[in-house]
Image: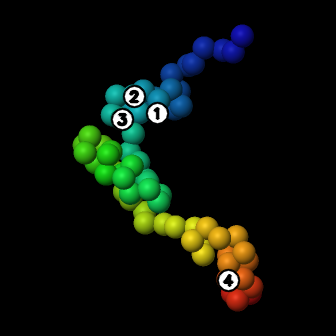
Amino acid sequence: MPPEPTGGPPAEAATRLLADGPSVINVGLESFATELAGQDRPVVHVDWVPPAGGDPRLARLLAKLLT
């Protein structure tokens, strides 16, 4: 059986998270960030898409150009 939490730093962080709610860095899907912001949650949105639009063949070609 695992030991009981001692109230050290991980337990304190969990308590703060549960009391304050999460702060979020959202990568890619803007609607997720919009939903969180609408709930007054702190959120930062990073507008990101995979290289070459997610096409593996084009991504390999681009990587060759950069090397």
Mark 4 or mark 2: whose residue is earlier in sequence: 2
Q: Is residue 61 above or below residue 5?
A: below
Q: CA distance from mark 2 to mark 3?
A: 5 Å
Q: Residue at x 43, y 63 (%)?
A: 46
Q: Is residue 17 visible?
A: yes
Provide residue 24's location: percent of width, then percent of height.
Answer: 41, 48
**Which residue is farthest top?**
1
Give the quarter of the figure containing the N terminus. top right
Mark 4 or mark 3: whose residue is earlier in sequence: 3
Q: Amino acid at mark 3?
A: Gly
Q: Which residue is mark 1?
A: 13
Q: Amino acid at mark 4?
A: Leu
Q: Is residue 56 above or below residue 44?
A: below
Provide residue 32's location: percent of width, then percent of height.
Answer: 39, 49
Q: Amino acid at mark 2?
A: Leu
Q: Residues within 10 Å of mark 2 (few under 14, many from 20)?
A: few
Q: Residue at x 44, y 56 (%)?
A: 29
Q: Secondary structure at mark 3?
A: loop
Foreground: disc 1 or disc 3: 3
Nearest the viewer among 19 and 25 is: 25
In the drawing, what numbered circle is on residue 21? Answer: 3
Q: Which residue is mark 4?
A: 62
In the drawing, what numbered circle is on residue 18? Answer: 2
Mark 2 or mark 1: whose residue is earlier in sequence: 1
Mark 1 or mark 3: whose residue is earlier in sequence: 1
Q: Residues within 10 Å of mark 4 (few under 14, many from 20)?
A: few
Q: Is residue 66 above or below residue 28?
A: below
Q: Secondary structure at mark 2?
A: helix
Instruction: Answer left or right for 65 relative to 30.
Output: right
